[in-house]
Amino acid sequence: MKKLFVLLLLLTFNVSHAQGKENVFTFSNLGYGVYGGINFETDSEIGGSFLFEIKTNVISNLNMNFSLGYSKLFHSIQYSVKTYSIDTIDNKVFYNAEQYNIKKYMYDVFPISLGFQYVFKMRNFSPYLLLDLSYNIINGK
């Protein structure tokens, strides 16, 4: 098990070392990604996630990415809601009471993200600084 861990660690270091040539033109390196997933829960309904991301270079050391996605999530709960209303018809007051059970919440989440990555290019080690601005639009039912 230790040998496998060391082998995976060495492969990770080899992959993280940049081998490509340096692009100097703005927006000359364009990449995109599509990510998806399924959320299984004990309920009969299945939630899912989808994300589309575009990444490009602004200058040789500065990268920019934009992502837009959608997620449908379910949260199982169990409680009862009691409510009432007062109505007046022909000067007569009527009271209406009702009770209903809530078994789950459903959330529609729309994440929007804009990020910048500045890479400090050095000979053997290239750290980076990442700034990511995100906003989630959430619709609960």
Image (cartoon, rainbow, N blue to C red):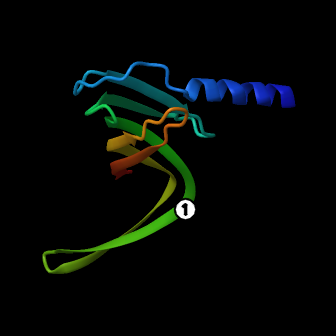
The picture places residue 88, in percent across and down from the top left corner, at: 19, 76
Above or below, 109 against 9 in this view is: below
The structure residue drawn at horizontal position 63% and vertical position 40%, both measured from the top left corner, is 42
The picture places residue 9, in percent across and down from the top left corner, at: 71, 30
Is residue 1 at all visible to an observer of this figure? Answer: no
The structure residue drawn at horizontal position 30% and vertical position 28%, both measured from the top left corner, is 56
For the N terminus, the quadrant is top right
- Dividing the picture into quadrants, the one containing residue 109 is top left
The picture places residue 132, in percent across and down from the top left corner, at: 36, 48
The furthest residue to the front: 123
In the image, 128 versus 106, the foreground residue is: 128
Q: How many marks?
A: 1
The structure residue drawn at horizontal position 37% and vertical position 49%, both measured from the top left corner, is 131
The picture places residue 39, in percent across and down from the top left corner, at: 55, 35
The structure residue drawn at horizontal position 33% and vertical position 30%, both measured from the top left corner, is 55
Mark 1 — residue?
79
Could you tell me which secondary element the residue under label 1 belongs to? strand
Residue type pointed to by label 1: Tyr
